[in-house]
Amino acid sequence: MSHSRLLALIASIVLALSGSLLARPASASTVDPSLSPTPYMGWNTYYGKVRPAEADVLAVAESMKERGLLAAGYDILWLDGGWTANPARNADGSLAVDPAKFPNGMKAFTDKVHALGFKVGIYTDAGPQNSSCALGSLGHEQADADQFAAWGFDAVKVDFLCGWAAKTDPEEAMTKVATAIRNNASGRDMIINICNPVTSPYWGEYPEDQQSIGSWAYAPKIAESWRTYTDVGWQGAILYSDVMRNFDANARHPEAAGPGHWNDPDYLGPELGMSTTEFGTQISLWAIAAAPLVIGSDPRTLSDTSIAMLTDPDMLAINQDRLGIQGTRLGSAGTLEVWTKPLADGSKAVALVNRGTTSATVSTTGAALGFGDSRLRVKNVWTDTTGDSLGRVAATVPRHGTVLLVVSPITGKPQTPRVTLSAPQVVAIDGTPVTAVSEALVGVGSTLTVKVTVTNDGNQPLRQVDPAATLPSGWTISDPAAVRILAPQKSTTFTVQVTTPAEATVGTHQVAFRATASGQAIGDPVNLTVLVAPAAPDGTVNLAHHPWISATSGWMSPTIDASVGGWSALIVSGVTYPTGIGIASPSTIRWYLGGECTSLSGLAAIDDAVKWEPQGATVTFQVVGDGEVLWQTGVVRRDQLQSFTLDVSGVRDLRLLVGDAGDGGYNDRANWMNLQVVCS
């Protein structure tokens, strides 16, 4: 039996013993698993807009080494497209390197990278090179592979943009390139990453086996990894919604992954458009998925927080676990989900995922995880807190967040009980009851009535239990009476008053709650998000020019008085509108009205900028006040102008939403125009 088959068989036996329902057949791969026995790690030039050039890459390498990324395992520096001269081939057909970017040649460049302790990867395409496609290896497969090896490269990314343009069969084209790389004249080992990003409907309509979602059927036999969906973002922009889309697509065929060959949902995007919480979700899920960890951002610009997340040893241990099992969802899909991954030491990694827009408790049990009625040791990877549980595995997870845990059965003397806090709930603002929310929108000088519940998941009582809070400067909180004893498996709820000062800064603030027992902090903190809003509009106001609370666009950024991206004026059916907001679906723009306004009017439509492309351009529009839909359309297409005049009396929280009409956001350029609100 081959080494790869033996590893896959061992993994299937361990997985069966763990109680998972996932069948894991022995791999039919001819790939040498020793090239990437665990998911490879590294960095790529593309998303962070770093020039694929010697000086730039070496500067990134020095930074990665200094900041601990190399020591953590991020050891492949990958050139993306743009490294060639123009044209990309010499008269004899050999590859031509851009002398301005690599003045000393490619071999000198790879030698310098290797001397710093890194490996180095290069980019090509499996399709034909022509006037519209700068670099394609079709017809040059063996010569290019031999050249990459002679230059000293350790990895090759094989794109499919040229192949897509020429309507080439991806399996045939990719197999030719991969075979040439395996049989290069130097006998050099090189990791192969197949990157067919073609995915319907984003790229047009194609048979499934021609798309990224079909690569899993053939790629494990020829490559160390293969892309499982379209690009996770744009250059300089990787957003949460696209991260979750790619993760879900990547989860379709966990049986294809294993030691030596990995499903690839694309690159990591810290600080390219996601919040810290959202990036925590991406890297947690990439760890659970046993995905290659390739940083897309410029490491030189990243905060210490992002570097700490990328190098967290517990997260990396999950991703790099030697069993190489891709995690799967426990239970059904939904807003709140549990994903689990068996680990070689008998424990399990558990991701508690909240796809929703407010904090929520996500939970499972030891029995559901396959541990029966065992007592459990639960460790939070991101906070490093550890506690014992009698079987409940739960956490309060912020919006778009993920709590990553390692759960293992234990025996012996009980240790510190695991304590969970519910999401803090605002039940009244300035004495007026409101529907309980974990994210409050207020003006300055407001008092919030907040409830938070503490649960003892362990088998030992806790004494003198009390909530403690960390507040923004100048904020105050009431002091509730402590609970003398909190018995095992019991909960208690505290009610406190949080007051924002008159001089509170406009913006998003966090009030962090944490349980204490006998004066000692215990368990993980949970946050109450308080949005201190800009002043409400006064009089008759052009809402497009009034400060919003937040604004999102499916790609690029919401643009005032111009089509999204600012490329043109707001134009619908040939008519130019001087004022409004251009966005791409999906989008939400939010304003604080403070209950001071009476009417809102405006227009909504697809912008004429879509006319360059016949596909896509279908959206829906909604106006929502305090969670209630005030106005909505069906599917809106080109040249369908929509108008509205609405009663917004008493509305505090106004949101304008644009959806993708169920067919993705391709070419969805939409406009809100002539937005006028009347307020007292």
Image: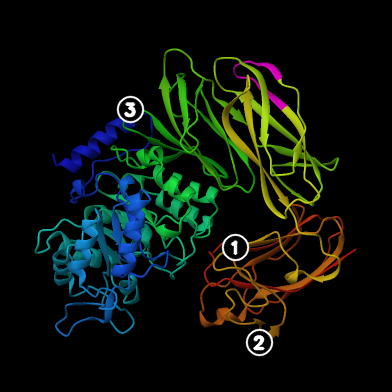
- x 78%, y 51%: residue: 503
Left or right: 129 in relation to 547? left
Judge by depth and name the residue closer to the eye, 619 or 508.
508
- Asked if the residues shown at circle 3 and circle 2 are in contact, with their CB atoms under 8 angstroms apart, the answer is no
Residue 237 lies, in percent from the top left, at 49, 64
Over which residues does the magenta segment extend?
483-493
Left or right: 405 in relation to 636? left
Q: Is residue 319 above or below residue 580?
A: above
SS for tag 1? loop
Please name the residue that numbered disc 2 is placed on.
574
- Asked if the residues shown at circle 3 and circle 1 are in contact, with their CB atoms under 8 angstroms apart, the answer is no
- Asked if the residues shown at circle 2 and circle 1 are in contact, with their CB atoms under 8 angstroms apart, the answer is no
Q: CA distance from mark 2 to mark 1?
A: 24 Å
SS for tag 2? loop
Q: Is residue 128 above or below residue 79?
A: below
Please name the residue that numbered disc 3 is placed on.
17
